[in-house]
Every structure is written in C-alpha cells, then in structure tokens.
Image (cartoon, rainbow, N blue to C red):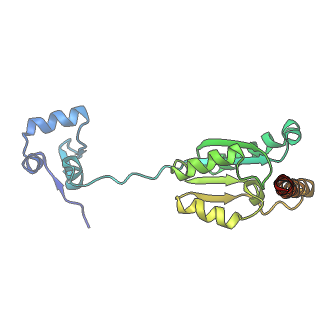
C-alpha cells in the first residue's frame, strides 16, 4: 500500500502553523521532510504525529554486560590465570559485539558467597545495572546452587551466559574448596563445644 504524503499546505494545516514556519523547521532540521524529484517538500503523517508527541519512538534496549572471572587462590592470580580467564570473556563479548560495562575479577573459594566481586556483581544485578552476565564455567560463579542463583539473577532481568560447560578438570581447586569448607565447619563445631564446656565448668 502506498504511503500517504502531505504537501506543505496540508502539513501546515495539520500542525496549525504557517508554511514559512515549516520551511524554517526544515532548514534547521527540526522536522523531517521528504523531497520529490522536483524539489517539493512532502511530509509523512507518522513523522508529524511524532513531532506532536502523539507517537513515541521505541528505543532499542541497550545491553549492559558484565564479565565475571574467579580463581581460588592468590597463587593462581599471580600466575596470570585470573587475567587470562577475564581476557577470554572479553574476547567472547567482542565477537558478539557486546559492550562490556563491568569487568569483575574475584579471588576466593566458590563456596564463599561473601567474596567481594560476587557481592559487587549481585548488587549491580539487583539494581538492574546489568542485563547480561558472561562467565566461563558454572563453577566460576559458584560451586553449589548454580540453578538457584541463575534463576535469582534472571528474575532481575539479567541473562546468565555460560561459555563452556562445567569445569571438571580443575580437581585441585575443587579439593581446596572442599578442604576450606571442612575446616570452616570443624572450626565452628569445636568452637561451639569448647564454649559449652567452659560454660559448664563455670557453673560447677
């Protein structure tokens, strides 16, 4: 179907302004016009409605991408493992033509949900400043409850993108995480028993 175009007189009546005003707006770029082969101005009704504020232009959503890299120890960081992991994430985003707004690097156990980078990432997602999260493996984000955390992030409008599958090759790091968990549990357990023993001895 051919789109209906208005000439300058019809457009001036539509907007309730003079022909001269339309010419000035055309020269200043304030209002879009189309030109015929003979150089005459033509106006689309859709453009006039937008100019009047009757139709709002739909803005394309802007991606706010965060990359998250993690290693368990400072030794791994010093060997460059953390930087290389983060670089791979940035390269992946570049291939997708995504603009990365937040590059987050963390050092700490995947069992620790209080590590600084993870807390910063969570705050960004909850405040809806990130709508895409890119990680290399699921266990870079967390050792356990990945599905729950992913669902929570997505409830705030953040898509979680895992480049590769679960990293099962790094058995040393997993063993270190498990030892850390056992040490923490043992410390709390024996600390509680010791406190109960002191309390009991104090009463007798």
Residue 73 in the image: state x and y as whole percent.
Answer: 85, 43
Number of dots carrying numbers: 0
The answer to whether 66 is drawn above or below residue 181 in the figure is above
Q: Quadrant of residue 194?
A: bottom right
The answer to whether 153 is drawn above or below residue 15 in the figure is below
Residue 56 in the image: state x and y as whole percent.
Answer: 28, 53
- Residue shown at the point (84%, 43%) measured from the top left: 81
Q: Tell whether 86 sits left or right of 25.
A: right
Q: Tell whether 156 sits left or right of 198.
A: left
- Residue shown at the point (11%, 36%) measured from the top left: 21
Residue nearest the observer in this picture, 45 or 130: 130
Residue 59 in the image: state x and y as whole percent.
Answer: 39, 51
- Residue shown at the point (82%, 57%) measured from the top left: 196
- Residue shown at the point (83%, 47%) measured from the top left: 72
Residue nearest the observer in this picture, 127 or 32: 127
In this view, the residue farthest toward the front is 204
Q: Quadrant of residue 110?
A: bottom right
Residue 19 in the image: state x and y as whole percent.
Answer: 8, 39
Picture quarter with the C terminus: bottom right
Residue nearest the observer in this picture, 158 or 198: 198
Q: Tell whether 118 sits left or right of 61.
A: right
Q: Quadrant of residue 55?
A: bottom left
Picture quarter with the N terminus: bottom left
Q: Tell whether 45 sits left or right of 77.
A: left
């Amino acid at each position: 179907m051919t789109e209906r175009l208005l000439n300058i007189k019809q457009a001036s009546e539509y907007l309730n302004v003079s022909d001269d005003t339309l010419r000035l707006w055309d020269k200043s770029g304030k209002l879009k016009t189309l030109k015929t082969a003979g150089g005459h101005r033509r106006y689309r009704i859709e453009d006039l409605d937008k100019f009047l504020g009757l139709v709002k232009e739909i803005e394309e959503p802007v991606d706010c991408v965060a990359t998250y890299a993690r290693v368990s120890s400072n030794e791994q960081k010093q060997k460059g493992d953390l930087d290389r992991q983060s670089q791979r994430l940035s390269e992946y985003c570049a291939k997708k033509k995504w603009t990365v707004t937040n590059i987050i690097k963390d050092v700490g156990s995947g069992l620790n949900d209080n590590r600084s980078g993870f807390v910063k990432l969570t705050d960004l997602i909850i405040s809806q400043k990130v709508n895409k999260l890119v990680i290399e493996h699921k266990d870079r984000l967390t050792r356990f409850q990945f599905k729950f955390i992913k669902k929570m992030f997505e409830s705030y409008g953040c898509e979680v993108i895992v480049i590769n599958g679960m990293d099962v090759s790094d058995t040393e790091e997993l063993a270190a995480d498990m030892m850390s968990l056992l040490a923490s549990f043992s410390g709390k357990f024996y600390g509680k028993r010791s406190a109960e023993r002191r309390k009991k001895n104090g009463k007798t």
